[in-house]
Image (tube, rainbow, N blue to C red):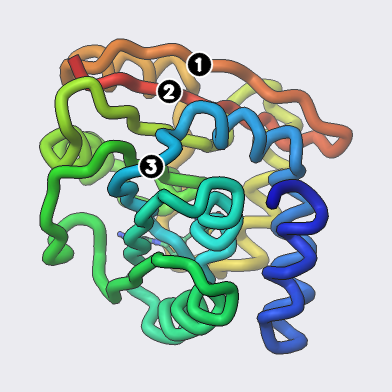
Amino acid sequence: MYGREAIAKIARALPFVERVYANIRFSILRPKLLSVMDLLLTDEGRILDVGCGFGLFAAYFGQTQPARRILGVDPDARRIELARSVSNGLGLANEFLVGDVRDAEVQGPFDAVYVLDVMHHIPADSQRAVLERLRDLLVTGGTLIVKDITTEPRFGLLFTELLDRVMVGMDEPLKYRHHRDWGAMLSELGFKVRMVRVPDVLPYPHVVIAATKL
Ligand SMILES: C[S@@+](CC[C@H](N)C(=O)[O-])C[C@H]1O[C@@H](n2cnc3c(N)ncnc32)[C@H](O)[C@@H]1O
């Protein structure tokens, strides 16, 4: 199951407030954007969802390919509890763990890892170490997918940052990077990198980076 039908099942499994959030989130990461990432992900095997939040995308990618075994990690215990309940309610084999990607007790190897709109929430001085850790958790030939926001055009970045600030407040760090900077960092860490900018009707400057561990 994929697209609107899969999204509707996830939304129905959530309490009201989170259902509203999920509908907003899926209107930002629309089915076309999800399809790009779905195609990049392995159809089966172990997959790590970094900063999984309410587990919306673990529930989505688990429905499109039920042989995937997704482990979601997020420091927010309440989100993890909801992620578990949604995936269990949909009969998916997903698992969830409360933890910070920098030191969570996660056992590799994984066939793929994805990080959806999370890298810019990691403090600037930890971002490289996080990518290094994710590389070490992957099998050789495994794929790391980073979906993030690039820094151009400037208006798109400001639009995104304003909405992110509404969600996280003024105290949390937000460190966006240009997609070429992420690409250079990933190449230095031993990945073959491909990336695509994904247009949107809203001004979000989405970029999807697919990095294969060499
Ligand atoms: C914008 S939300 C994205 C959630 C989910 N990936 C999605 O696309 O809906 C960012 C998430 O990153 C998580 N996060 C922030 N810092 C993290 C860290 N150091 N390790 C793991 N997750 C983190 C937050 O708790 C939050 O759930």
Could you tell me which secondary element the residue under label 3 belongs to?
loop
What residue is at 69 percent from the left and 45 percent from the top?
29
The three-letter amino acid code for the residue at tag 1 is Met
The residue carrying mark 2 is 210
What residue is at 68 percent from the left and 30 percent from the top?
205
Q: In the image, 90: left or right of 99? A: right
Viewer can see residue 125? no
Residue 97 position in % (x across, y down): 28, 73
**Quarter of the figure with the C terminus:** top left
| Residue 61 in the image: above or below residue 95 | above
Question: Which mark is on residue 195?
Answer: 1
The residue carrying mark 3 is 44
Q: Residue 15, located in which quarter of the rendered image? A: bottom right
The three-letter amino acid code for the residue at tag 2 is Ala
* First reached walking from the N terminus: tag 1 or tag 3: 3
Q: In the image, 205: left or right of 65? A: right
Residue 147 position in % (x across, y down): 51, 36
What residue is at 25 percent from the left and 70 percent from the top?
99
Q: Do the residues labelled 1 and 2 touch (CB within 8 Å)?
A: yes
Residue 18 position in % (x across, y down): 68, 79
The three-letter amino acid code for the residue at tag 3 is Glu
